[in-house]
Amino acid sequence: MSQNTHLARLAALLMCPTLALGSGCGVDKKKHEAVVKKAETLSKKLEAAEKKYAGLESRAGHLLKRLGSEESRSTKLAKEAKLAREEAKLLKKTFGAKIKASEKEIKTLTKARQDAEKRAKLLTKLESSFKKLIDDGVISLKVSHGRMVLKMRSKVLFLSGSAKLLNYGKRTLKRIAKVLMMIEGNHFQVAGHTDSKPIKSKEFKDNWELSVARSMAVAKYLMEQGVPGAMLSVAGFAHFQPVASNKYAWGRRMNRRIEITLMPKVPRQLVKKPPRRGRRRRR
């Protein structure tokens, strides 16, 4: 039986109070009063239940609304967290690359500084070893593009238009060879230079041939004095790398020269070996 049906019956009883005093309704007064009191109690309970139900419905609505808001906020926070993680990865990658680049740059600068210090020490050593030759103006030392260059005027070594070493030139090269053999980890390039005047000789067609022949003569004599051939190379630049103007006699004298450049030795592991060719099978 539903609560509303029960209340309807109670209301019917309340509608015949006069009959309840007699026997019309078939209920005596005490029973009638008890029923009325019970109906009032139930009515109050119903009212309280309805209020409680309304409160629960309101709270449920509020909670559902709050849940929706929390879900929306949770989704938003999840997106923000994802973006933050991606940004953190990007920053880590970017700064990691920058740190590596900085470390590489520091190593490069450190090596450059160490190389510069080595060149400075070597230059001081060579200046001390060649002091008399430098003071006499026979040779000069300079650093060009990070490389040490020993320069000799051609007149010290050769006659005009010739690639045959003079005796004084041989004595000079002999002293130079002793010092070069004490320098480790370097390669020595012997380069010949001329002035811009065309050569008139049966032996040499042009300044190219003369510059190469002179550099070869110097390199071969250094080998005879004990400098390993593996540490030597020759080059001829003719008149294409002047150090002074060829318009004047003094400039041409400066341009006619032999230069010995101390170059870094290339490690063997950096030299690419030619691929081995497999033996072909005879058919």
Image (cartoon, helix red, strand yellow):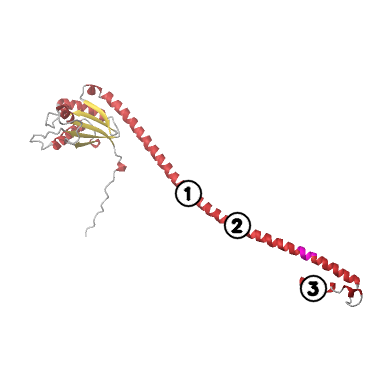
For the N terminus, the image quarter is bottom right
Disc 1, SS: helix
239 falls in the magenta region: no
First-in-chain label (3 vs 2):
3
Residue stretch in magenta: 44-48
Amino acid type, residue under disc 1 in the picture: Lys
Q: Position of residue 137 (x, y in %)?
A: 21, 23
C-alpha span from label 3 to label 2: 44 Å
Which label was assigned to residue 8?
Answer: 3
* Residue 39 shows in this picture: yes
Q: Position of residue 176 (x, y in %)?
A: 23, 28
For the C terminus, the image quarter is bottom left
- The mark lying in front, picked from 3 and 2, is 3
First-in-chain label (2 vs 1):
2
Q: Residues within 10 Å of mark 3 (few under 14, many from 20)?
A: few
What residue is disc 2 on?
69
What residue is disc 1 on?
89
Q: Position of residue 197 (x, y in %)?
A: 12, 33
Residue 257 occupies quadrant: top left
Which label was assigned to residue 97?
Answer: none
